[in-house]
Image (cartoon, helix red, strand yellow):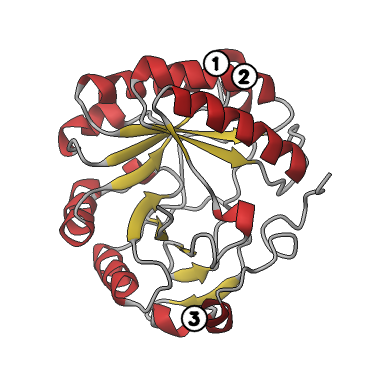
């Protein structure tokens, strides 16, 4: 079921230098009290979809110097911990995770292609994290960001989902931010490939996410990103500043679109750098 989601960037730094990273790296960690207040405010806001969730991201969220405390805060509010990680520090924190958490590991190809995109040795670390999560019966998934350089690896990724017991494949579309040696797919090619992927993974009992990119946000999924300094973005892809903590989240929502159940045009927002065909 689509859900309102809070994309909480609890740090703005990472061990890797991924070619498709959309953030400007810094050295800032979100304070614990801001995490608590922003998360509470989000869950209490007048949001358009019946389900809401909090996703810890970054940078690499496991680098937060008080990550254990972050988990306690989010678990008390959300009921579970959901995060997106490169996998490097998963072994260090495996005892913090519970069966109903949602740990997403980014894998962008086979060993050669993934390491080209994310850095030498990063594939091995990511796969090790998936296997460890599987061994400990912790709910986990794979995130794959499709571009022309890695599209031929998608069947390898699906096989990896099966091998490591991943319950879901998040099949993303690469959005070009700057020149980095990667080429974007057209929107229509991505939709076509996603349909093929969806049919194959569902035969294996694996979910394939529907995204706000497909329909446009608001009517599909309402996402909001909060940076470590408290800046509110409409989303990580579009990066349009709509407010700043401690401003109330309900006061920065796109009320006209919510009331009319109207999508924002993704080709004027997050997909503005992409071709349709």
Circles 2 and 1 in contact, beta carbons < 8 Å = yes
Give the mark nearer the N terminus: 3 vs 1.
1
Secondary structure state at the residue bearing disc 3: loop
Which residue carries the number 1 mark? 156
The residue at the point 46 percent across, 23 percent down is: 203
Q: Position of residue 260 (x, y in %)?
A: 57, 80
How many badges with numbers are in the image?
Answer: 3
Q: Position of residue 11 (x, y in %)?
A: 40, 52
Among the 4 quarters of the image, the one containing residue 174: top right
For mark 3, does the 10 Å Cα neighbourhood hold few (<14), some (14 to 19), or many (20 or more) residues? some
For mark 2, does the 10 Å Cα neighbourhood hold few (<14), some (14 to 19), or many (20 or more) residues? some
Q: Please name whichever residue, 264 or 61, is drawn nearer the observer in this view of the structure.
A: 264
Circles 2 and 3 in contact, beta carbons < 8 Å = no
Among the 4 quarters of the image, the one containing residue 73: bottom left
Q: Decide: is 88 above or below 50.
A: above
On screen, residue 42 versus residue 72, left or right, reads right
Residue 237 seen: no
Which residue carries the number 2 mark? 153
Alpha-carbon distance for marks 3 and 1? 41 Å
Secondary structure state at the residue bearing disc 1: helix
Which residue carries the number 3 mark? 252
Secondary structure state at the residue bearing disc 2: helix
Residue 66 seen: yes
The residue at the point 18 percent across, 53 percent down is: 69
């Amino acid at each position: 079921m689509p859900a309102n989601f809070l994309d909480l960037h609890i740090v703005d730094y990472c061990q890797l230098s991924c070619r498709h990273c959309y953030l400007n790296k810094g050295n800032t960690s979100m304070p614990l009290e801001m995490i608590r207040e922003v998360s509470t405010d989000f869950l209490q806001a007048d949001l358009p979809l019946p389900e809401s969730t909090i996703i810890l991201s970054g940078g690499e969220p496991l680098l937060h110097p008080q990550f254990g405390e972050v988990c306690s805060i989010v678990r008390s509010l959300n009921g579970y911990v959901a995060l997106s990680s490169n996998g490097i520090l998963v072994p260090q924190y495996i005892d913090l995770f519970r069966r109903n958490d949602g740990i997403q590991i980014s894998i962008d190809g086979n060993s050669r292609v993934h390491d080209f995109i994310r850095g030498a040795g990063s594939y091995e670390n990511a796969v090790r994290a998936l296997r460890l999560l599987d061994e400990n019966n912790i709910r986990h998934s794979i995130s794959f960001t499709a571009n022309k350089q890695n599209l031929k690896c998608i069947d390898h990724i699906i096989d990896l989902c099966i091998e490591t017991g991943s319950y879901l494949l998040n099949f993303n579309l690469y959005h070009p931010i700057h020149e980095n040696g990667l080429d974007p797919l057209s929107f229509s090619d991505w939709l076509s490939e996603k349909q093929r992927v969806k049919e194959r993974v569902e035969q294996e009992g694996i979910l394939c996410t529907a995204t706000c990119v497909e329909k446009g946000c608001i009517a599909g999924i309402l996402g909001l990103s909060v940076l470590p300094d408290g800046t509110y973005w409409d989303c990580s892809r579009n990066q349009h500043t709509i407010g700043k903590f401690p401003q109330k989240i309900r006061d920065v929502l796109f009320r006209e679109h919510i009331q009319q159940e109207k999508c924002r045009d993704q080709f004027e927002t997050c997909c503005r750098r992409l071709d349709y065909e």
